[in-house]
Image (tube, rainbow, N blue to C red):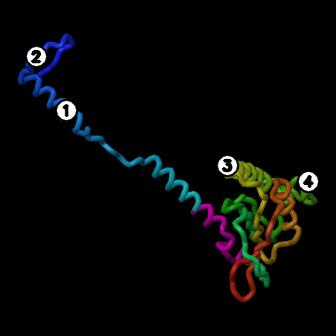
Amino acid sequence: MVMSNAGEVQRANVLDVKRAVTRKKRRRRQDHVHQELNITAMLDMMTIILVFLLKSLSASAGNVPQSDDLRLPRSTSQADPSGALQIIVSRVSITVNGHNLNLSLRNGLVDPSAKRGGGSGFLINPLNSEMRDQHEYALALSRASNQPFSGEMALIADSETPLRTIFEVLYTCGQNGFSNFQLLVLKTGAGQVRR
């Protein structure tokens, strides 16, 4: 029985009862919700992991490939190398974090035409532009991670590299904010890279 507003009693017909029962069943029944994996979040996570792994592998100072053009000097130092920016000076080229600068060296010396001020200059132009880019990248990374910019670099040079070339590389890097440097060498007897 259904009561109206005026207090009258009315009989419910069968059709009204069936409608009421159907409405209750619909309310109880949960609609099927199509659930998917959030691929975007998973791809973001995988990208971050991949970048982290690539950065840690490429910046590892222990992964210095030696060849006929690059033989590291030996040392008895016990300190381990850090994950600083790598600059490799071989007998024939200079490489920054795996990027070859297309700067050829003759007998370990930089061509005077590639330096500001010619033969007496210390600033190597191709290295200067690359280090400027690395400095901007490092500053952006330090801002994003709320870490201070340390200006660390690891100089990996052939044991026969002239001191003039090493001074030119250190000067050029210092002009771009990378003044905290390490010289990487081989630990005597163990064949491991040390700073």
Bin the neighbour count of mark 2 within 10 Å (Cα to Cα): few under 14, some 14-19, many 20 and up: few
Quick check: 164 above or below 75?
above
Mark 3: amino acid: Ala
Quote the CA–CA distance across marks 3 and 1: 54 Å
Mark 4: amino acid: Gly
Which residue in the rendered view is the most extreme toward the front? 7
Query: For the residue labelled by badge 2, is the local secondary structure a helix, a strand or a loop?
Result: strand
Residue indicated by mark 2: 10
Counting from the top left corner in percent of width and height, residue 108 is at 81, 70
In this picture, which residue range is highlighted in magenta?
A: 53-69
Quote the CA–CA distance across marks 1 and 4: 89 Å
Disc sitting over residue 144 in the figure: 3
- Verify CB contact (< 8 Å) between mark 2 and mark 1: no
Quadrant of the image for the N terminus? top left
Please tell me which residue is depicted at 38% across the width and 49% down the height of the picture. 37
- Verify CB contact (< 8 Å) between mark 4 and mark 2: no
Quote the CA–CA distance across marks 4 and 2: 107 Å
Quote the CA–CA distance across marks 4 and 3: 37 Å
Mark 1: amino acid: Lys
Quick check: 26 above or below 191?
above
Quote the CA–CA distance across marks 2 and 1: 21 Å
Disc sitting over residue 24 in the figure: 1
Q: Nearer the viewer, mark 4 or mark 2?
A: 2
